[in-house]
Amino acid sequence: MDIYPNDDFPTVSRNNKTFVQVCASKDVLRRKGTRVEFDEELQIAIFRIGDRLHAVSNICPHNHSPLLHEGEINAEDCTISCPLHGYEFSLTTGKHTSSNLSHVEVYEVFEEDDAVFLEKPEPKELDWKW
Ligand code: FES
């Protein structure tokens, strides 16, 4: 599922952060990522593993490819593998699992009243290392 938030999407404040209500809980499936595109460079992939949601940048730093939502989820290790060349990232820390060369940004996400709330990302200068 792809989601394109705009100013009509409800927001809530929590812990000095703004969270956008992006979809219903049922829209984030197990074994499949949900892509939330704030803009072309600001995309987040949400994954459901067990009872928890995880949110990371959807853009793989290897080739600047916006494809992590289509990657393979490893529920046991809580990682996502990029579908293009298999680079693997932790969904809890965002780190590349076999090097310190790069990482993906991690975002806060929570569920409440059967809705998913995602930390509103701030545009930032990206530091591509590969
Ligand atoms: S673009 Fe993701 S591993 Fe190459």
Image (tube, grey):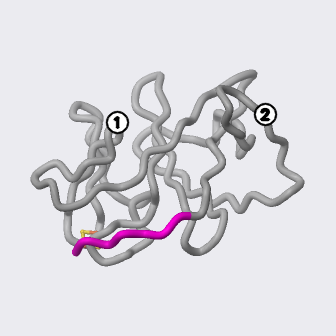
Q: Main secondary structure of the magenta part?
A: loop
For badge 1, the amino acid type reads: Thr
Q: Position of residue 40 (x, y in %)?
A: 59, 75
Disc on res. 12: 2
Q: CA distance from mark 1 to mark 2?
A: 23 Å
The reply, left or right, for residue 19 in relation to residue 73 is right
Which label's residue is closer to the chain start, 1 or 2?
Answer: 2
How many C-alpha atoms fall within 10 Å of the one at disc 1: few (<14), some, or many (≥20)?
A: some
Magenta region includes residue 101: no
Image disc number at residue 47: none
**Which residue is rendered at x = 30% and y = 77% of the image?**
63
Residue 71 in the image, given as x and y percentages of width and height = 34, 58
Please name the residue shown 26% across and 41% down the image: 74
Number of numbered labels in the structure image: 2
Which residue is disc 1 drawn over? 92
Tell me what residue is drawn at x 47 percent, y 26 percent: 52
Task: Give 78 or 126, whichever is nearer the viewer.
Answer: 126
Highlighted range, magenta: 124-130
Q: Quadrant of residue 27?
A: top right
Q: Nearer the viewer, residue 127 or 110?
A: 127
Q: Residue 99's spot in the image, x, y percent? A: 11, 55
When the figure is inspected, residue 110 is found, relative to residue 4, above or below; the finding is above
Which structural element holds mark 2? strand
